[in-house]
Image: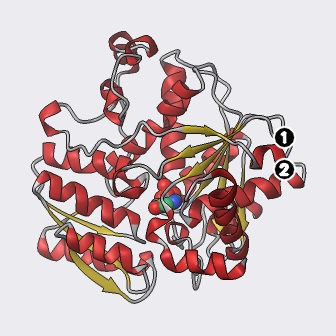
Amino acid sequence: MLVAYDYEEAARRITPADLRIRPHHMWRYRELLPVLDDDNIVTLGEGGTPLLHSRVIGEALGMPHLYFKDESGNPTGSFKARGLGMAVSRAKELGLNKLIIPTAGNAGTAVAAYAARAGMRACVIMPEDSPLTFMLDCRLHGAEVELVKGTIADCGAVAAEKADKDGWFSVATLKEPYRIEGKKTLGYELAEQFDYDLPDVIVYPTGGGTGLIGMWKAFIEMEQMGWVGGRKPAMVAVQASGCAPIPRAWENGESTAAPWENAQTVAAGLRVPGAIGDFLILDAVKQSGGVAVAVSDRKLIHYTGELAAREGIFSSPEGGAALAALVRLVEDGSINPDRRVVVFITGTGYKYMEAMETILSDG
Ligand SMILES: *Cc1c(COP(=O)(O)O)cnc(C)c1O
């Protein structure tokens, strides 16, 4: 289920010029967002994140136009704030007050915070081996937390059962259409930051894929409204080699992805063995002329360290995965170093202390 708008009407009501004077958070695109009454907006100031020109890594790779979209400064420390800020706001508008989510970590902390802000109850189901910070964070925000043996897939089954039995509303990835609407603001923001001449390549660490699907939707919407031309960025979906259902399906030329067995990676946000929107991710990658690739935990940890040491960006391991993939694709000639490339730093490193220790001990 995806949200559709009357784009002719929207194009009459809002233009890129109107945006210039609006505050820099995601609600500046409100004519293209699903919340009808401003009173229902539950916000902590999400969105409006910086696009940072690479200072050192780009030069080392011979890339004059390498950028990092740094989402680590969002409320709750990741870009999940965009999707769940939107989902919680819309849930409030629809009169819901009990939200449940299966999560690998960041989505849970976002629901917990936004539910607290909205005066709603939240229930978070996460793997028992999730980083401790995530559990403490959710509990402090007042959420009920249930720990489950296994991955987010097992958490999904528990959440679905609880939702049925106890009347919780599920804000699991793509179970409701509004998280995508929050994430699509990434696409609008990039367009603005590139002055409506979209970048050539987007490198995106992919779990459930809401950000990739959402940005792709934004590019199509902007084209329909005449804000951008038809040329869209090549979408590169990056996963960890310990959980790589999308790259595997891509290599086999499949349009859906079989679930990954024994999913393991320190990049918790990428530990999604079976994405419900697999076909949408694979379709966007294909239509955009992109590619899906997997990188090892060793590499993604190394490049998380490089982001901190060379660029001053304290990224979560998912951002390191995106950079590791870029380096590989430039080195093997798949990406021309003259291209304008955006690497997504999807969350802060502060929640992943265990992973950070590994980086230092690895040197
Ligand atoms: C959830 C998450 C991802 C994956 O995002 P999707 O949109 O679900 O693919 C990547 N990085 C971080 C830090 C995350 O929390």
C-alpha span from label 2 to label 1: 6 Å
Q: Position of residue 125 (x, y in %)?
A: 30, 76
Q: Would you place residue 298 above or below residue 75 in this image? A: below
What label sits on residue 337 in the rendered view?
1
Q: State the residue at coordinates (35%, 34%).
A: 25
- Relative horizontal placement of residue 216, taking residue 148 as reference (left or right): right
Which secondary structure, mark 1? loop
In this rendered view, identify the residue nearer to me: 353 or 146: 353
Instruction: Find disc 2 in the rendering and name its residue.
Output: 330
- Relative horizontal placement of residue 347, taking residue 133 as reference (left or right): right
Q: Earlier in the sequence, mark 2 or mark 1?
A: 2
Residue 325 in view of the camera: yes
- Relative horizontal placement of residue 54, taking residue 145 as reference (left or right): right
Q: State the residue at coordinates (56%, 37%).
A: 51
What label sits on residue 109 in the rendered view?
none
In this rendered view, identify the residue nearer to me: 310 or 92: 310
**Mark 1 Cβ and ligand 1 under 8 Å apart:** no
Neighbours of disc 1 within 10 Å: few (<14), some (14-19), many (20+): some
Contact between marks 2 and 1 (CB within 8 A): the answer is yes
Q: Position of residue 88 (x, y in %)?
A: 23, 51
Q: Would you place residue 233 above or below residue 230 in this image? A: below
Q: What is the three-letter code of the residue carrying label 2?
A: Val
Which secondary structure, mark 2? helix
Q: What is the three-letter code of the residue carrying label 1?
A: Pro
Q: Position of residue 91 (x, y in %)?
A: 19, 49
